[in-house]
Image (spheres, grey):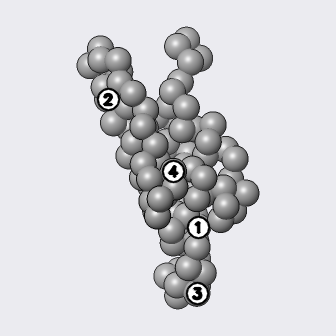
Amino acid sequence: MRNQNSAIAEMIDDIRSIGTDKLAGDHPAEDWLADWENLIDLREDYADALTRGEQPVLTIPMTDGMPIIARMDDTADCSVAAELAQPPVPGS
């Protein structure tokens, strides 16, 4: 999970490296990147709870009345976000 989070963070950094001027002209891009950052934070909190021996629940945040993964998919055909929003399978 943490390796996936690192890969997501690297993707975000790569996209942001094109510059704020170019991203400012693409309103959905900023929201999409923010949703990815929210998903990373959620997954990190989940991983921390697992490390403490807890049994956390992975709850997807809502933005503008819809789960962020649905909004992400609407913006950029991003079905992988839905997969990453699922709890990890033990032992995988």
The residue under the point 60% across, 57% down is 72
Q: Nearer the viewer, mark 3 or mark 4?
A: 4
Q: Position of residue 54 (x, y in %)?
A: 30, 17
Q: Nearer the viewer, mark 2 or mark 4?
A: 4
The residue under the point 38% across, 46% down is 41
2 up-or-down from 23: above or below: above
Q: Circle 1 sits on which residue?
A: 15
Q: Position of residue 86 (x, y in %)?
A: 55, 32
46 up-or-down from 60: above or below: above
Q: Circle 2 sits on which residue?
A: 48
Left or right placement of residue 35 versus residue 78 in this view: left
Which amino acid, by three-letter code, is at mark 1?
Answer: Ile
Farthest-out residue, left = 52
Q: Circle 3 sits on which residue?
A: 25
Instruction: Name which of mark 2 and mark 4 comes first in the sequence.
Output: 2
Q: Circle 4 sits on which residue?
A: 67
The residue under the point 73% across, 57% down is 77
Q: CA distance from mark 3 to mark 4?
A: 24 Å
Q: CA distance from mark 2 to mark 4?
A: 22 Å
Q: Residues within 10 Å of mark 4 (few under 14, many from 20)?
A: some
Q: Position of residue 91 (x, y in %)?
A: 55, 11
Q: CA distance from mark 4 to mark 1?
A: 23 Å
Left or right placement of residue 41 versus residue 79 in this view: left
Q: CA distance from mark 2 to mark 1?
A: 27 Å
Q: CA distance from mark 3 to mark 1?
A: 14 Å
Farthest-out residue, right = 77
Left or right placement of residue 23 versus residue 37 in this view: right
Q: Quadrant of residue 47?
A: top left
Which amino acid, by three-letter code, is at mark 4?
Answer: Pro
